[in-house]
Image (cartoon, coloured by chain):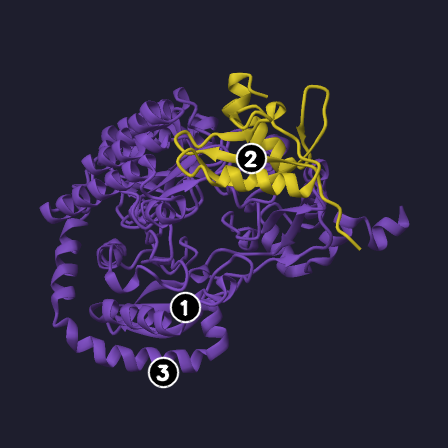
Chain colours: A purple, B yellow
Amino acid sequence: MYTYSEFDRDFLATRNAQFRAQVERRISGALTEDEFKPLRLMNGLYLQLHAYMLRVAIPYGTLNSAQMRQLAMIADRWDKGYGHFTTRQNIQFNWPKLRDVPDILDALAEVGMHAIQTSGNCVRNVTADHFAGAAADEIADPRPAAELLRQWSTDHPEFQFLPRKFKIAITGSPRDRAVTQAHDIGLRMVLRNGQRGFEVIIGGGLGRTPVIGKVLAEFIPEADLLPYIEAILSTYNSFGRRDNKYKARIKIMVNELGLEEVRARVERRFDSLRSEWGGADKAVLAHFRRQFSPPAFRVVPTQAYHIAYENDPVFRSFADTNLAAHWQDGYSIVTISLKAHGATPGDATSDQMRVIADLAERFGHDELRISHEQNVILPHVHKSDLPALHAALQEAGLATANVGLISDIIACPGMDYCALATARSIPVAQEIAQAFAAREHDIGGLKIKISGCINACGHHHVGHIGILGLDRAGVENYQITLGGDATEAAALGERAGPGFAYDQIVPAIARVIDTYLELRRDPHEQFIQVFHRLGAQPFKDALYQTGARANAA
Amino acid sequence: MTIRFTPSVVTANDLLSGDVIYLTPHGNWSRIHTDAALFTEQLAAEAALSAAQAQPDQIVGAYLAPARHGPNGPEPAHFREVFRARGPSNYPHGKQADNMC
């Protein structure tokens, strides 16, 4: 993985010293809140319902054990002993005190981490496929390009005050695990005549105006990636609307100008920028690629795995849901679920973080990933180590075998923490997970995603079943969307109809699930496949107890 | 037609801790909702809010939050304010941990 250079360390030290001085001036009264707010936001510090919240970037979701241990230390020393992993591969600390934040930032800098640009109208944390560098279906590791984008966009003087926030996601696989079509820019690696490049998707996003991104360029050679991205940002920065924050995202610009016009403007800008770079970006990218070279894989027998798989049903269940195919023979990608039934999705205690860090060191070539689905991944585990790893996870209460199942829910913090939320998300996720835990393996693959307001941090639009919490006349109310998809077949869910009260949302979901179980042809036909075969109507009928079945009753 | 004023308390977050605080009848700040001054008249509420906003070295983001009379003092009248006065529902953190609600 990328290791900070002396330049990086100096930059961060200077930046942290600046923020320390800004905090001091705020506390002394020399800065008003209006003056301080943009400064703290640029450093990831929010003020939420009950306390400050510090959002720390985990670039493209990659961590090592030392970084994970430091997050655990921060959670214990300055927070309440836990952290919350988010849908943008960040970690949030929910209870820091203003005076402590400069010390927290210094502690992060010790392990090459920071909270810069995790808020504000700038390029946010560049996210990536959480299986990057490990997935069997990958063309190449996208993280060197992600690191290039991260360094280029960090403190970039031209792009610190964009019309609105800007999110970039990147994948090196044809299977999209990074929701690239719901980002301001989504990058999907493709090969053309043996040459690596990227399909560039633009103007995707969820929030109050959900849009599936459109292909701006089918193929941009890897060597031209940075000037092309700069051309997009530059076009957006000039044209994007600053008069209305709800019309300020690039998706609105694409809608207003039309894709063709955007493409023409970007191409013009690209033509003039391309020569200015003079190849420096290419040299840096080559340097990064060396830093992301694969670990020294072991070549040893894998019988231990096969024996455990045949003989231990609990291990088999874990292997069936939580393992993914690795490109290296003999290796697996292991997802550690942070969705124990009844737990807060994405939360890890400091003890769990330390266990995970130890396991990464012992079994996983010291690498960890955080997924946008709010789980932790050990990307490189030799199959012979899987039984021992599973036993260690069981001991730590981290062996929940539910990845991709109904209880593996994405949920934003909702009104339990977030100042923008209109309803709670977490308790709804907890209750759904508990209600279906006993039969979730029978229900099979199903993505439920919950947001506590229309900003859609919980990605509800692209959940097979999406839940959106709203405030309806002073009462929590939950709308259901059906048929969304976050993969390469990205689709926005269709709103089922009127919302449900807090105490009616779990029974409503149960009616959808029961309908699916009745209608599926066999246990292999997943919920989303039944939805594609039959449409939303049978589920709407079940939700609102209308249609032939209700009339016959 | 005049829009009827909803009885309100003045609330904010403490600058240093970020904790939710309420303006009391004595003009100081309390972490406990029932200690708050309940304003039933718009002019008085807005004057109190302005006075609160003039203390930027102590508080952040003051606003008027709907509230009603209760047996022990003012109670929040909207569920968002109920959560602010208590703490999150997934852990016993915040005011509920300190018997502040």
Q: CA distance from mark 2 to mark 3?
A: 51 Å
Rounded to the nearest whole Å, what is the CA distance between mark 1 and mark 3? 14 Å
Q: Is residue A293 left or right of residue A437?
A: left
**Amino acid marked by disc 3:** Ala
Pinpoint the chain carrying mark 2: B
Which element type, helix, strand or loop, lies under badge 2?
A: strand
Residue farthest right in this picture? A552
Percent coordinates x, y for residue A58 in the rendering: 31, 44
Which residue occupies 36% across, 59% down?
A: A168
Amino acid type assigned to the residue bearing label 2 in the image: Thr
Q: Amino acid at mark 1?
A: Ile
Do the CB atoms of the residues marked 2 and 3 lie less than 8 Å apart? no
The x, y position of residue B80, in whole percent, is 61, 37
Q: Which residue is mark 1?
A: A202
Q: Residue furthest top?
A: B99
Which mark identifies residue A264? 3
Image quarter hosting the N terminus of chain A: top left
Mark whose residue sits in front, 1 or 2? 2
- Can you tell which quarter of the image residue A268 is in? bottom left
Disc 3 secondary structure class: helix
**Mark 1 vs 3, N-terminal side:** 1
Say which chain tag 1 marks. Answer: A
Residue A470 in sight: yes
Q: Nearer the viewer, residue A193 or A400?
A: A400
